[in-house]
Amino acid sequence: MLFRSICYTVVLTDNCSNFIDTSAVVTVLPLPNINFEIQPNPQCVGQTVTFKNNTIDKEQMNILWDFGDGVTATELDPTHVYNTKGTYDVKLRAINSYGCADSLVMYSGMQIEDAPVADFIFSPEEVTLLNPLVTFTNRSKHSTIYNWTFGDGGSSTEFEPTHTYSDTGWFKITLIAENDVGCQNPYSIQVYVKDIFKMYIPSAFTPGDRDDLNTELSITANGVKEFEIRIFNRWGELVYFSEDWNQNWTGRDDSGNAQPLGVYFYTVRVVDVNREKHDLKGTINILR
């Protein structure tokens, strides 16, 4: 700190007698050279604000901050969290080693905005591969920018997007809501895309057909974990058994004997990927 000494002459007179003069040396001590900045500004409710003290020789001073919301601090470079939206006067008072004090006030120097609150719901409640389209309802507050990720590599910046899943399993959906200040708030929900059991067993086929069309009993299915099929002739005799729904029946028994045309009865037992059991019964016609 710099200071200077000045010599002052003082003259005293009462207009009746001789004047009196004397000299004195006065030392002028410097005031603190106060300066500070606020980062970031503006900021959001509940988020940290840093006050950077740029005062020269601040380490040799007594410091008092007033953040404008009833809270004070004596640290050189404090941080503070505001809990209410508004603008605040920020004051820094410093006393240097000579006992000289000064203050700097930034009137309405701190702007605090409401923090964004991310929130959403989705429909339908049960998502399946047969009904894989998910619609999102955005219930966020104090936000203008929205970034969605759907857990399968998909994303969106729409306010209320839709998304179609192509696989089963658990997926984490995350919405990050952001306001104009740049504050962000994430919200996530886990959604389960369920596989659905589906099976189609034809009612007739024509083994040995010369055009090679529909010559085997071919089952189509989805969501099968365990499978058994038994086919019986009209006398109740078992002519075919399999535990593989991808294995077609050629119309022959286990000995390779071609079965005559007519009506056959089947029973199917399935455990699907959701561990649910299904018992199916029906008839199959062998045509020639």
Image (cartoon, helix red, strand yellow):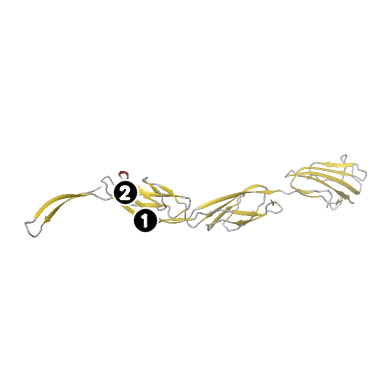
Percent x, y of residue 30: 25, 50
Percent x, y of residue 5: 18, 49
Residue 229 in sight in this render = yes
> Dot 1, how many residues are within 10 Å of its Cα: few (below 14), some (14-19), or many (20+)?
some
Residues at discs 2 and 1 in contact (Cβ within 8 Å): no
Count the marks: 2
- Which residue in the structure is indicated by mark 1? 106
> Dot 2, how many residues are within 10 Å of its Cα: few (below 14), some (14-19), or many (20+)?
many
Could you say which disc has been placed on residue 171 in the image? none
Q: Is residue 108 left or right of residue 12?
A: right
- Which residue in the structure is indicated by mark 2? 94
**Farthest-out residue, front:** 16
Percent x, y of residue 154: 60, 52
Looking at the image, tell me whether mark 2 or mark 1 is earlier in sequence order: 2
Badge 2 element: strand
Q: Quadrant of residue 270?
A: top right
